[in-house]
Amino acid sequence: LPHLPERRVILIDVLDPRMALEKISTACKNNQKPKLILDGLFGIGLSRPLNDVWQKLIAAVNESKIPVLAIDVPSGIDADTGEIRGAAIQAAITLTLATPKRGVLLPSAIPFIGRLEVASEIGLVPCPSSSELNWTSVEDFQSFPPPRIVSGHKGSFGHVSILAGSLGYHGAAVLAARGALRAQPGLVSVFTPENVYLPIASQLQAAMVHPWKTSSDVSDSCTAILFGPGFAATDLPSNLKREMLQIWTECPLPVIVDASALDWLPPGQSTQKPIRVITPHPGEAARMLSISTDAVQADRVSALRKLSARYGNCFVVLKGHQTLVGRNDGDVFINSSGNPFLAQGGSGDVLAGYISGLIAQSTLQREPLKTIRYAVWQHGLAADRLCDKITNWTIDDLLQSLGVR
């Protein structure tokens, strides 16, 4: 083919699936079997079950273990409903055209999609309609974050206070602090129970570390507060939970809540109207809503909106495959970056810290939704860049890659 120069291409025109099945089986078994299969069997209009012959053809492709790039939608998936019409191609990458089809974002289709990429510019006229769901792309962050003022100093770029860590979980506080530092706020302070002060302080140089005593120490001079990473031990200070709830409900500063502290939050609106952010994974979201994790995953957008409504219209980062960012009202954004190697202990602590380090900066507080989306996207992008180089990277590597432009 002229657009695939210097590559050996086997083109199988599938008019009769029986004949094509034999050709595919032969091509996938010889000594020069393809390195990649392009799947273009069906378009987005498939709405009927596939018969046995088509199912056998799809099974032969899947059983070959050759990576598949699906064009628009993996064959066998209903582009509107995500239903599997008897069988479906298991793609390594799906390159969807113009815009993601709703069906490829639904739980039933996700195991077949692989990595979802969007080819947005294919010559179509601009679409006049919009949806509550929005796909995040690199173009969303052109000229963002805005340039820093050349006369700035530490006080110009915010001060984030992090309340984190407990016996056996002190590493979460360290990772959150390092994540915040990657966002380059002016100052980072960590407050932690006294019994883990030494292991945390010994691992941090640029962040200030203090034994936690009272919430008044935390809010003095800072511009954003993160609490929750590593609060999993049973011997936390008796007044910690009470004072954290006071921060959530009464503090005029932006507050980000992560990990174990999510279970402490009271439903309802805070007395102030500042920025509030929660960052649950599906299991945490399920506990907060008193439903099952499967129910959260079955309708992630609904779960996000219910969480936001329950906790005062806060911003919600519902983590997982294609992390969602949004609130009870307005648009919900689907994150396009990231990969399964982010499923490591400490990844969420880094993200929470990075979000807080950005939100602490006054210029970024003006666009909180965009700032949160940017943090989530950069977190995933860092993982994608690492996977282009190595597969056995760790959370320490993620920190080094985070925020690099």
Image (cartoon, grey):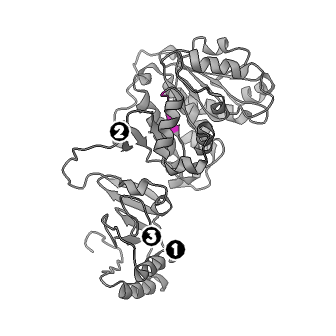
Q: Nearer the viewer, residue 31 or 169?
A: 169
Q: Which mark is residue 88?
A: 3
Residue type highlighted by circle 3: Ala
Residue at 41% in and 15% down: 151
Which badge, 2 or 3, is on the more N-terminal residue?
3
Q: Residue at x 44, y 76 (%)?
A: 58
Q: Which region shows up in magenta?
A: 313-317
Horizontal and vertical percent position of residue 235: 81, 28
Element type where label 1 sits in the image: loop
Q: Residue 180 colored magenta?
A: no
- Which quarter of the rendered picture does the N terminus lie within? bottom left
Which residue position holds label 2? 140
In the image, is residue 187 above or below residue 33? Answer: above
Q: What's the CA distance linking mark 2 and mark 1? A: 35 Å
Q: Quadrant of the C terminus?
A: top left
Q: Residues within 10 Å of mark 1 (few under 14, many from 20)?
A: few
Picture coordinates of residue 397, whole percent (x, y): 60, 44
Of the numbered discs 1 and 3, the one sitting upstream in the chain is 1
Can you give x and y, in whole percent of width and height, for residue 51 in the image? Answer: 40, 79
Q: Nearer the viewer, residue 387 or 349?
A: 349
Instruction: Tell me the CA gap for discs 1 and 3.
Output: 14 Å
